[in-house]
Every structure is written in structure tokens, then in C-alpha cells.
Amino acid sequence: MKRTFKKFTVTTGGTPQPLVGTTTSAATGPGGTDPNGDSAVVTVPVADSSMFLNGDWVVIGSSANSDQERVFVQKVKDSTHINVKGMTLTHVNGSYVRLSVLCQAVYVQTTAGNTGVIYLGTQGIVKATYANVFAELIPVAATGVQPLDYTDPYRVSQDGGDVGEYFVDGVTGDGYLPSLTII
């Protein structure tokens, strides 16, 4: 199955962001336990929930802040809230919430009119030194010209790879179009 998303833009150049994700719009934390002793469902306020589906897994937080955890999206409540199960940590306003699903292929295409390079890498990406960078997509200023793209196929295994491991950086406001082939 092919899973496509809206156009994403680099929010703040020099600050890596998840390839497919958003941020919390308020601090949030665990909701205790339900009557069965399982973790309670927590409503997480996010800047944009459009990239998530009911039944997705997401990672909230980052390894740099020591608050990274993977939780289950029980329901996309509305355009700015998701209900998750399994949250055990507290997260500050502005924490990353990134899609974390297995896929057989990741495809990223730049958008026409970008002013700078889009850098693709893993968490901890530093575009200035190329630390954790695995691809750079040169800008294409003219419309009607095929933008640069990147594909990372995992077709050798049923296990695939986790899209939550992909991060992006570039010039503030430059755009990219990610899509996934889901296992």
C-alpha cells in the first residue's frame, strides 16, 4: 500500500525535524492506568494530526531530551489532537511527535522553488558537518523541471524499516513530499 502525505516544510532551518511528524502544542504526560491496570488513553494536543491514522505508532520526544517513547495512536480525535495509549513520560510543549511505522520503501521529493538543499538523515543530523546525513537534495528553482528525489527501498525483507528514524533539515520554508510503501 502506498501512503502519501501533504507537503511538509522545513520549520526552522538548522533544527532537524522528523521527516513525517509534528510537535505537541502543549505539555502532556501519562494519564495513569485504567481499571484493568493498563496505561490510560491520553489526549495529546499537536500542531497538526493530518499525517496520522487510527492504529499508527508514533514516537513522542527525542533521544536528546531523554523523553523519547513509542506509543499507539488509538484515535485521531480531530485536526489538532490524537488519543494515544502507552505514554509513561512527560513531554514539554514543542516535543516532536513522529510517525513510526514499518515500511518497505521511503520516497522523498523536493518541491519546486526551494531556496536551499534538503538534507535527509537520522536523529542527530547536522547539515553543516554532514553528521548523520545520508542524502542531500539540491534545490530546483524552476517549475516544470523534475525536482530531485530520494528513495530508500527495503524490499529485501518483510521487516522493512521504521520511517520514524528519518529526519530532515534545510532552509526555513523549503518543502518536500514524502511517501511510504507500507508493509
Image (spheres, rainbow, N blue to C red):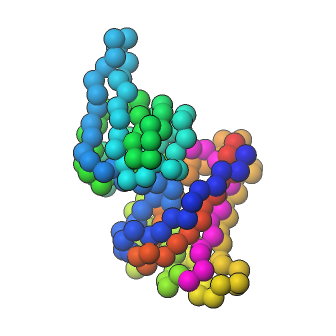
Q: Residue at x 55, y 41 (%)?
A: 53
Q: Residue at x 34, y 44 (%)?
A: 45
Report x, y in % for residue 130: 46, 75
Is residue 118 within the magenta segment?
Answer: no
Tell which residue pokes out farthest to the bottom in this image. Answer: 142
11 to the left or right of 51: left
Q: Is residue 66 visible?
A: no
Going 55% across and 65% down the picture, which residue do you hit? 7
Q: Is residue 158 above or below residue 87?
A: below
Between 138 and 48, the one nearer to me in the picture: 48
Q: What residue is at 57 percent from the left and 60 percent from the top?
A: 6
The image quadrant that residue 56 belongs to is top right
Q: Is 117 drawn above or below residue 19 in the view shown?
A: below
Q: Is residue 47 visible?
A: yes
For the magenta stretch, what is the residue range? 101-113
Q: Is 109 contained in the magenta span?
A: yes
